[in-house]
Amino acid sequence: MNENESQEIRIEEILGEGNLKVSVDSLQIFRDYIQKNISFPCDLTGREDFLWEEFYVFGPGDKNEYAELKKTQPSFTDTYTFMSFDDQKEDRDGLMVKVKRLSDHSQFVLPLADLKVIENSTPNHQLVHDYAVWFINYLKLRY
């Protein structure tokens, strides 16, 4: 069995066999599962550049302006600590989490699917990674 098959089995164990579609109900099931199984502290960083950063990372954006914006905006290069889930309703971005940037203690609400656990060999890493892979791959089935 390869890693993709193992991962799908883990996700089906959380959501139920054949219940892989992203929906309000499946998001709540995954949220409850993560809340029960995540260990703290849990440090995160960006999976890839955040949407606002693309203009600066891949486009013609000014590097000095980017450096200034990163002081007040969350960046994929920052390190955060997972604080809690945000109580707002989940939307097209999936589960939203409250995080605190370690460098200056600024707080943000970010999509969990945009984040990854820094320590690769922890159960937290697999938990958050499984959620992100599920959300990104099965979101297309939502509509």
Image: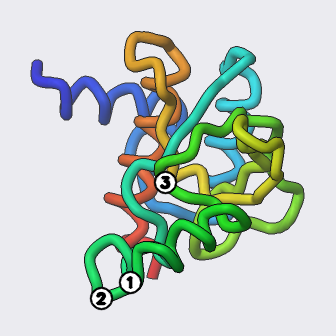
Q: Name above or below for residue 87 compared with residue 59.
A: above
Determine which residue is flagged by label 1: 55
Q: In which quadrant of the rendered image does the N terminus lie?
A: top left
Query: Answer yes or no: do the residues labelled 1 and 2 have beta carbons within 8 Å?
Result: yes
In percent of width and height, residue 110 lies at: 66, 59
Q: Nearer the viewer, mark 3 or mark 2?
A: 2
Q: Nearer the viewer, mark 1 or mark 2?
A: 2
Is label 2 in a helix, a strand or a loop? loop
Instruction: Report if residue 25 is visible in the image.
Output: no
Is label 1 in a helix, a strand or a loop? helix
Determine which residue is flagged by label 3: 76
Is label 3 in a helix, a strand or a loop? loop
**51 sits left or right of 3 in the view:** right
Q: Residue at x 72, y 18 (%)?
A: 41
Which quadrant would residue 70 be assigned to in this image? bottom right
Q: Earlier in the sequence, mark 3 or mark 2?
A: 2
Determine which residue is flagged by label 2: 60
Q: Earlier in the sequence, mark 1 or mark 2?
A: 1
Which quadrant would residue 136 be assigned to in this image? bottom left
Q: Please name the amino acid that badge 3 sits on.
A: Phe
